[in-house]
Amino acid sequence: MKKIIAVLSMVLLMTGVSYASFPVKQNTKTEQATDQTVNGEFASEMTELEALNSFKAEMKSEKAADNKMDDMLIMLLLWFFLGGLAAHRWYAGKPAGWNILFILTGGGCYVWAIIDLIKIIQGNFK
């Protein structure tokens, strides 16, 4: 669904047609920019490029959020199936000494393991 919305937004941006669901006030700088020309092209095309660049940045942030969700799911599965071997900690890049201590103490008698699980679910496991 996100991809469909992204493609439709991209098409609207590329055609120069955009719609707002709220009233938009144009400031005088925007009105002046549309009157000026840059290398024979209207400056409004430059604002479209700026809008396209901000759209691209927005898409990158969505991809980062999707990657974070994927990492969280992978860490949850590793915690569940290989938690005793500290697989989720190795995956997250935790220091080797702490991971070995985790294995030797059985996840701190499962207290440490439960704390890791809570942090993974909250998205705070770094």
Image (tube, rainbow, N blue to C red):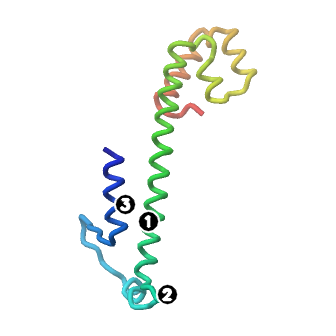
Q: CA distance from mark 3 to mark 2?
A: 24 Å
Q: Residue at x 31, y 49 (%)?
A: 4
- Marks 1 and 2 in Cβ contact (< 8 Å): no
Q: Position of residue 52 (x, y in %)?
A: 44, 65
- Residue 19, by quadrant, is bottom left
Residue behind mark 1: 52
Mark 1 / mark 3, whichever is N-terminal: 3
Residue behind mark 2: 38
Count of residue discs = 3
Q: Position of residue 85 (x, y in %)?
A: 63, 12
Q: Quadrant of the N terminus?
A: top left
Looking at numbered disc 2 in the image, what kind of residue is underneath it? Answer: Val
User: Dot 3 lies on which element?
Assistant: helix
Residue behind mark 3: 10
- Residue 96, by quadrant, is top right
Q: Position of residue 105 (x, y in %)?
A: 67, 9
Circle 2: is it few (<14), some (14-19), or many (20+) Cα within 10 Å? Answer: few
Q: Position of residue 5 (x, y in %)?
A: 31, 52
